[in-house]
Amino acid sequence: MNKCIAAIDMGTNSFHLIIVQVKSDGSFKIIDREREVIRLGSHKGKEFSLISEGEMEKATDVLKDFAKIAQFYKADVRAIATSAVREARNKEEFINHIFEETGITVEAVNGKTEAELIYLGVQHALDIQNKKILCIDIGGGSTEFLLGENGVSEFAESIKIGTVRLSKLFFPDFHLTESGIDMCRHYIKDKLEKNLNIHPNHNFDIAVGSSGTIVAAASIISFRRTGKFKKSLNGFTITASEVYELTSDVLKCKSPVDRLFIEGMEIKRADIIPAGLLILTEVFQALKLKEMTVSENALREGIIIDTIAKLEVMNSLVV
């Protein structure tokens, strides 16, 4: 019998839901998906120290809707929360509130686990068997790095540089200033330099990028190349020079409204994309990357693969 699983990725910038149908051989097909932009931890203080009451209620409303969709498909739900929740002082209150209101158990995973789940998702998206890959995922609160081959990771790192976090720190009201841009660049450089695994001397076959900023950048770059929008960007490769040119163009647009004049700009990302592109350019430079291949799979698909593997283990123990 085919079973349905719902994976919820509770990111700092947005919540994603995918519903998949699992086949008897363990493979799966996505049958529904939803995305809601929600900025966790962005309303109080400089760091993600607190999830506000308003954010908690918005998260509850979104997850109630996700729970209804999962119920429609009779899908088992697994929800993973990332940096904003794991760093919040009121994390336990938030998790308990979500469970009481929606029945959803939230797992707040550490950065290493997050990176490894993203890697699982990426492996399912691209033909990277027998290839060593450097996986980079820019999120709202943190950026994950993983070097791995055939499912085995050499290192998995999570660095506290993300689009919402840095926008909050350096671009109040999402308006750009030269001093803000300079401070943001230095902050990112400093965080990358302090991590011993982030250096240009790794040997790998392919650099893979996933999640919002990277997919959004690839969409604009693809449009610039062809004058058309691609339905799927999975496997699409962007070059360093294209990333630098796009970043330069975006940083000239001081307000979110100005950025909307860049063809292909996503309305709900125009405010935080400067911070995301600054992270991306500094990552390209720190690792001396010439190009990056896009994976449309990320954490949510990794949650599905990990859940299927756990179910298979449980079933084998029952037998």
Image: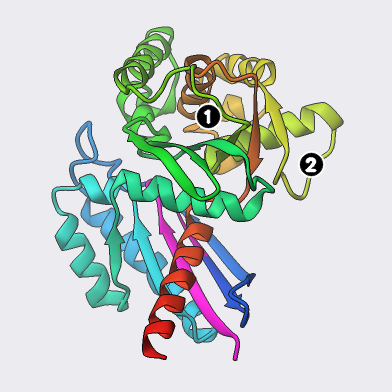
What SS does tag 2 mark?
A: loop
Position of 262 relative to 103 (above/below): above
Residue occupying the point 36% across, 60% down: 80
Q: Earlier in the sequence, mark 1 or mark 2?
A: 2
- The location of residue 66, given as percent across then percent down, is 45, 71
Height in image: 57 above or below 228?
A: below
In the picture, the quarter occupied by the N terminus is: bottom right
Going by the numbered disc 2, the residue's amino acid type is Phe
User: Does the rendering let one see residue 265?
Assistant: no
- Residue receiving disc 1: 256
Residue 168 appears in the figure: yes
On the image, numbered disc 2 is attached to which residue? 229
Residue at x 61% of width, y 56% of height: 124
Assess whether residue 14 is covered by the magenta stretch. yes
Residue 34, image quadrant: bottom right
Q: What colour scheme was applied to this rendering of the protein? A: rainbow
> What's the distance in space between the residues labelled 1 and 2, CA to CA?
21 Å
Which residue sits at x=49%, y=33%? Answer: 271
Contact? badges 1 and 2 (CB < 8 Å): no
Q: Residues within 10 Å of mark 1 (few under 14, many from 20)?
A: many
Q: Is residue 277 magenta?
A: no
Q: Is residue 29 above or below residue 170?
A: below
Image quarter for residue 259? top right
Magenta region: which residues? Answer: 1-17
Image position, residue 105 (x, y; %): 29, 71
